[in-house]
Amino acid sequence: MKTNALIFGLNEYTVEIEKNISADFENVHIFNLADEGENSFDLSDNWDDLSSQIDMQESVAFCILEDMAENIFLTISLRDTFKELTIVALAKDKESADKLTLAGATRALPTTQTTANIIVEMLEKPIVTEVLHDILYEKSALKIAQIKIEDHTVFDGKYPADIEWSRDHGIIVISVVHEDMSGEFIYSAKAKHHLIKSGDIFVVVGYEQDIKDFEKLIGNRCE
Amino acid sequence: MITLIFMSVTILIREVKSHVNDDLLFFNNYIVSFIFFIEYILRLWVSSSVTKIIIEQSEHDIMIGDKFNLFKALKDIFAVKMKYILSVKAMIDLLAIIPFFHQLRLLRIFILFRVFKLFRYAKSIQTFTSVVASKKFEFFTLLIFASIIIFVSSVLIYVMEANNPDSAINTLFEAVYWSIVTISTVGFGDITPVSQEGRVVAMFVIVAGIGVFSFTTSLIVTSFTEKLDEIKDTKMIDDISKLEEFYLICGYENVAKEVAKKLSENNKVIILEEDYHKAEQAKKDGFVSLNYDPGSVESYKKLRINLETQVKAILCLSHSDVENVYTALTVRSFNKEVFILSILINKMNRNKLNFAGVNELFYEKELVGIIAKDFVGHPVAFEAIHALRSSYNGIDVEEIVVSDRILENFAMVGELENIKYRVVLLGIYKKSKKRFFFNPIDSTLLETGDYLLVIGNTQLVKEFTKYLQKKGSKK
């Protein structure tokens, strides 16, 4: 887990993001778009002051400027200087989100679409929403984990769909991420013809203890 | 009723030159007339509420401290009923019953009045009448103008031609007949002016006729154009009132657009938007949209819908908390049960929306905060759930309700054969225990109302659902 959170932009989103993430980071720095003043930044490419004060390797940046053009410019500017930085950027709509992704954001969040999706999900799939919500917030004992296969001999010569995961291991495997990082649903045609081998990553749902047992069997958890 | 009307008229036409079966005549004269008579009495009965008049009179008398005046109440009832009896619609209904007195043979022609009853049943005729009625003044002016032309030209042609032995116009009636035929631009040609003066009158009438004809046409077209939106709305409201279930979205802005787009994939969506341009935009985007104020009770009355049975939820998605509070309060003022969901723009207004009776609130900024926390706190779960939520690569997480039909053939989880359909059964939500059971064992019993949470290719999940339903029905 990274230690610093850098929030670029001062508006209502800042308050909510700061409130929610403060427990996950040692330091939360908020920067305002202004020419002068403490904790201010401008859209020039000079980030020397910032990098001298904060360990950027251990930081996550949140770009939440309300002007989309400025937000995209900020994202490009950060990405250009800090190649490895995790950047979460807010977008008004899908179009801006695509542009932010092109600009180098690790994750772009289109606010309108996200709100609409959550509203529709709540109306159309209330049970799914509740269950996924509980898993995500760890309100139930269920967890989602990513497990890398270290020792493929356990499943030698088997395909993911052939194994009775739930009966044998008490977990459910949702998808398999291959070496080339392409994720495939467990029952998709591609995954069906892919022999399990070391380096494959399984995304699994299960209770903590069952996941630990499974880890012991095949590899280690990667977060 | 429409069938009865057409049967009556068909029998009347057949009777003119052929013998009609006595049973049919009996049916036409007595049975049909009797049905219309019953209809007339019922319409008379429901035209106004007798009880309401009596109660109003009683309340009035109690309020001013008098004894209940029954005579006054009866007088009011009589006046109201007479007003209905003397209305055009009621007169037509009454005349349509007259053929019942078949001894008066001439009165049989009144069967044709039954045709006028079609006005009651055919919506398009009512629409046409209402459109024409909206231009009453213009039509009246036109009528006066045409009458003056007909009168003047009839007198002129009579004066010019009546004494001419070659002319076919000998009486004032013939002169009026010629004028009307000419001014209407029909011109049968059975009567034509022969004198020079008569022909001048004819030219004058023909020119006036063109004016009258074009004025009438333009009047009808204009009134239809003006009323077009209203006619379309009426048709739309009729269609809406017939819908079984739909979502009512109040406001059409950014979030509403997205929600409407997603909900309309599997549901009917109706949009109420006060702003004309936004309502039109919603129509252009392919939604059923009405330019009504969602904060007015009148709008819901016009819609003629049952909020409890037809509306799945009311979504207040305007980008103004003031409007959303107003809409929620309006709905709550006449319905306490319907589910109301609203977005919150400024968190200071959260309590106000809750107070207005909103069941579920969505605050966009808070959601963003939570999502940001998910992303940094549980990146694996976040990505996996995000992929499932957004139907990434066609993989979706769905809930299937266990119906009686499904239960008939599948008693236990182990019988579901979901793996055959390449569907992952994540778990079961037990309705009776209100609890989610992850990865249930094969011997878990299914119950009606339980939800199966499945993950799979959208198409395969659909096929799996179909399989569960079909297999149940075969039994």
Image (tube, coloured by chain):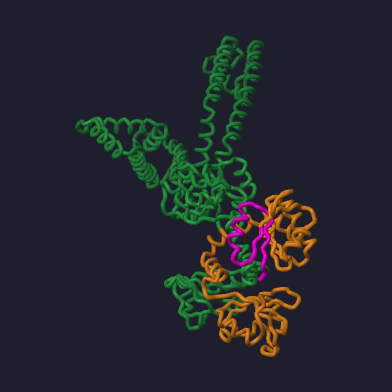
Chain colours: A orange, B green
Where in the figure is residue B117, as x and y percent of width and height?
44, 39
Q: Where, by quadrant of the figure, is residue A116 drawn?
A: bottom right
Q: From what the image shows, is residue B146 above or below residue A184?
A: above
Please state, as top left, top right, bottom left or bottom right, where the C terminus of chain A lies in the image: bottom right
Q: Is residue A137 above or below residue B25?
A: below
Q: Identify the magenta region.
A: A1-29
Q: Quadrant of residue A115?
A: bottom right
**Residue B96 at x, y percent in the picture:** 40, 37
Residue A10, magenta (yes or no): yes
Q: Residue at x 62, y 76 (%)?
A: A145
In the figure, residue B448 lies in which quadrant? bottom left
Question: In this view of the protein, which residue sits in the foreground, A187 or A127?
Answer: A127
Residue B364 is covered by the magenta coloring:
no
User: In this view of the protein, can residue B244 be seen by the observer?
Assistant: no
Identified at 67% across, 63% down, the residue is A5
Looking at the image, can residue B79 be seen?
yes
The one of B280 and B90 positioned closer to us in this rendering: B280
Towards the viewer: B199 or A164:
A164
Which residue is at a point 67% across and 65% down the rendered structure image? Answer: A4
Residue that lies at the very extreme toward the left in this rendered image:
B67
